[in-house]
Image (cartoon, grey):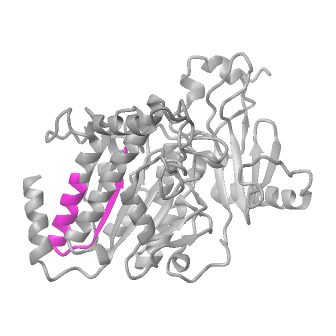
Amino acid sequence: MSKLIIILLFLSTGLTAQNTEPNVLFILADDLGINALNCYGNEVVESPNIDRLYKEGMHFTNGYSNDPTCAPSRASIMTGQHAPRTNIYRVVDRYKIAKNAVEMRKHMRYLPPPSNHLYSNNNGLNPETFNIAKAFKQSGYKTAAYGKWHLGMGTSAMQNAGFDDAIETKGHYGFKSVPAQTDYNNQVYNADYCTEKGIEFMANCVEQQKPFFLYMPYYLVHAPFEPKAKYVEHFSKKVSGTKYDHSQVIDVLAMIKSLDDSVGELMEALKKLGVDNNTIVIFTSDNGHYRVKGNNMFALPYKGNKGDVWEGGIRVPYIFKWKGKIEPAGQSSMPIIHVDILPTLTDLLDLTLKGGHELDGVSIKTELLGKKQKKRNKPLVWFYTNYSGFNSKTKEFQSKWVNVILDDNYKLLEDVETNTYELYKLDDDPLETKNILTKETVKAQLLIRKLEEAKIKHGLPKSKLNPEYEH
């Protein structure tokens, strides 16, 4: 750290000539729900640094993840494409490896599309796929990533994805790193380590007068629950005797505090390096919050959690800051989803896409720069094919194949197993309590048609009957 501090002090006081291309700092939280920040309404959470970012930039009230689980969303962030194009539909095929997998398959009418296997070498995200790192790299940017990857190993590992420097980390204390690093011990917290690496990278880029794209996908606040002891003590006292007085709630509050610390250190480094005015900062999460024992507050007031296509499983915070370009304290109700990030950045910075790389999202440049868009010109779609959590007694799945389309505040869900639909009007019913399918038949048929068109456009394979199905 001493070398890093010297670099920061030198640069903050002695550097005058700077690169003029805007830098990008992209911060991705893990499993951080829509109600897991103070600035988004949770008064128990302490997130002063993210709250400051919220005030200095524009936040979105209808922000979505591309999937209610990790890997498909991260693939969409990297490529600007939905799962049928990346072939990363699921984290793992639970219907093949669960203890009750044989029984589970007997109750699955259809087989989901095959998904790349993230836990075997060379079979995750195709390293030849064009992605956000490559878009910046071919435009002359220095690129780096430190933190969670979860898109494959071997040739599919993060260091092979187009970054100039990349270290994948897994866990919190005693974390693993790929490639294996030797400059930390079991007492070092993963987030602190990644933050130090990120700051050192930014400092080197500023010293070299090179624009940078820094991707910081933190492991926080994903399990295991390994918070810092000082924050456990702090929140234990704060919530003692309240409805939040539960060990798991306290652990999550403490882990959010650590995430916020890291965001604060990154933001302070931008100022010390003299590039705060010339850096686009993006903050979001990969999916909605997991269910928390004691008080499941981090996805509230919405229905569902991580692993659900209900709003609680896919709504996430989005904050964009660009000093002098994006008005501070801005708010937008326009829906935004992960596949919008790459087209937005290429539009803002005039980056060149590789020929033939089709983007599934839209640019929200005009929205960010204060020219309000009337509405999206593309609906939001989800292809969630994860069969898991089969209950042998009830013969029901916790999650199964559900396709979703959201257009003009109407959300249609298709249960592939039963060939049934549900329809909700989110501006009237954001908690998804009233299925209006039979009341709004014209709108339902329109969305069913649009969903079928989206399946074809994005290349979703047709459902195949499962030969093991018995029910």
Residue 316 is at least partly visible in this image? yes
Q: Nearer the viewer, residue 297 or 104?
A: 297
Q: Is residue 163 visible?
A: no
* Point 92% across, 54% down: residue: 439
Labels in figure, total: 0
* The C terminus sits in image quarter: top right
Q: Start and end of the magenta stretch? A: 196-219
Q: Is residue 265 left or right of residue 319?
A: left
Q: Residue furthest front?
A: 241
Q: Is 204 situated above or below 167?
A: below
* Residue 13, placed above or below residue 256: below
Q: Quadrant of residue 418?
A: top right
How far from the left and from the top, in percent, is residue 287? 53, 48
Compared with 228, 435 (above or below) is below
Q: Nearer the viewer, residue 248 or 129?
A: 248
x, y (%) of residue 338?
Answer: 52, 59
Instruction: Compare residues 250 and 289 and report the one nearer the observer.
Output: 250
